[in-house]
């Protein structure tokens, strides 16, 4: 079990290292608006301490830094060295002195090293963890007394997006198909499921909302570049080389059929945003002390 956990963490780190140069940089507004919606939902205030779990290229990190202001502090952690290097450079370029980015396994963060925070955000991260409920439990001590955890995940997709997924699904290896269709993956796709996972992990009251998002593409080429610039690259890499031309042709044909009157392609996705409070009744040492 431990060996499998380490293998999964290495695989996630390697995947996000490969996409780090292009992540959130293909001209499609996606991860930044998602992160900003989550940060608005969890509600950091000026002067607070905030943590961005799985900070990637900084979509939530920079939104948190804006919210807590010059008197607050923001820490970002990510398992991929390429992501950490890129977001450190971006933070330096912005002249931010209130942020700290650390290389760390988000599924088992070093609580003693990190301390406790008023706000913890994990934008589009929790469902990547080798054992998501275990990771959620490991995040609990990162909350100061009265602190809040905010997570986001992908809810239902429109018919066009679901049919696009189905172009790839038959060509994926069994383990990837099982991951996409597993009970825990289905739980992350609904407000009730996410609330249940947070309750199972021992959090206090949970508030869940949904937001409708739309990814807009100029054409199939931009979609292909975008889908290879994030975790979707793993899907592309899982398709056997001999089958890839047929998959690409089928995806392009499907996307062309989705062009609107303005010539652009729109795929709609519901997001699930959840805010959970620090568990009640914890000893002070476990609950943390507010910064």
Image: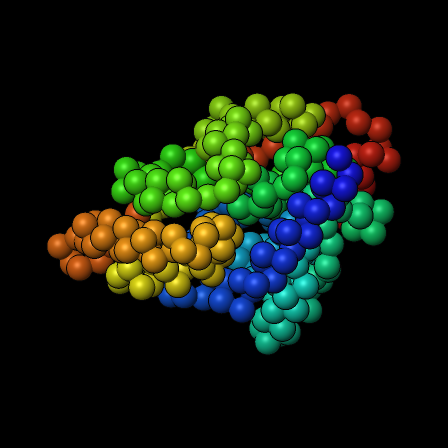
Q: Nearer the viewer, residue 55 or 19?
A: 19
Question: In x, y percent, where is residue 271?
Answer: 43, 40
Q: Nearer the viewer, residue 268 or 224?
A: 224
Which quarter of the rendered picture does the N terminus lie within?
top right
Total number of numbered discs in the rendering: 0
Question: In x, y percent, where is residue 243?
Answer: 38, 52
Residue at the left extreme, as displayed = 261
Q: Is residue 283 visible?
A: yes
Question: In x, y percent, where is residue 11?
Answer: 64, 51
Q: Nearer the viewer, residue 138 or 120?
A: 138
Residue 228 found in image quarter: bottom left
Left or right of residue 125: residue 255: left
- For image coordinates 39% across by 63% down, the residue present is 225
Looking at the image, what colour scheme do you see? rainbow
Q: Is residue 106 visible?
A: no
Question: In x, y percent, where is residue 124?
Answer: 53, 46
- For image coordinates 79% across by 34% down, the residue present is 287
Figure check: 50 above or below 102: above
Residue 136 found in image quarter: top right
- For image coordinates 77% across by 23% down, the residue present is 281
Figure check: 281 above or below 31: above
- For image coordinates 27% across by 42% down, the residue present is 160
């Amino acid at each position: 079990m431990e060996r499998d956990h380490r293998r999964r963490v290495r695989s996630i780190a390697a995947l996000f290292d490969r996409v780090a140069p292009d992540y959130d940089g293909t001209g499609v507004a996606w991860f930044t608006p998602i992160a900003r919606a989550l940060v608005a939902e969890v509600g950091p205030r000026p002067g607070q301490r905030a943590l961005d779990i799985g900070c990637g290229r900084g979509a939530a990190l920079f939104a948190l830094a804006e919210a807590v202001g010059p008197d607050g502090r923001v820490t970002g952690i990510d398992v991929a060295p390429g992501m950490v290097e890129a977001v450190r450079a971006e933070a330096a370029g912005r002249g931010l002195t209130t942020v700290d980015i650390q290389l760390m396994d988000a599924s088992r963060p070093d609580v003693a090293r990190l301390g406790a925070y008023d706000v913890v955000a994990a934008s589009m991260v929790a469902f990547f963890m080798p054992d998501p409920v275990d990771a959620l439990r490991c995040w609990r001590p990162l909350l100061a007394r009265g602190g809040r955890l905010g997570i986001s995940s992908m809810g239902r997709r429109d018919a066009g997006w679901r049919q696009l997924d189905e172009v790839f699904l038959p060509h994926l290896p069994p383990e990837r198909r099982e991951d996409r269709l597993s009970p825990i993956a289905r739980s992350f796709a609904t407000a009730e499921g996410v609330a249940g996972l947070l309750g199972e992990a021992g959090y206090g009251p949970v508030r869940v909302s949904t937001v409708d998002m739309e990814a807009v593409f100029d054409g199939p080429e931009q979609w292909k570049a975008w889908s290879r610039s994030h975790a979707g690259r793993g899907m592309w890499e899982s398709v056997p080389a001999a089958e890839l031309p047929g998959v690409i042709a089928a995806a392009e044909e499907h996307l062309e059929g989705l062009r609107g009157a303005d010539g652009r392609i729109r795929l709609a996705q519901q997001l699930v945003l959840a805010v959970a409070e620090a568990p009640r009744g914890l000893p002070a040492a476990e609950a943390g002390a507010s910064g």
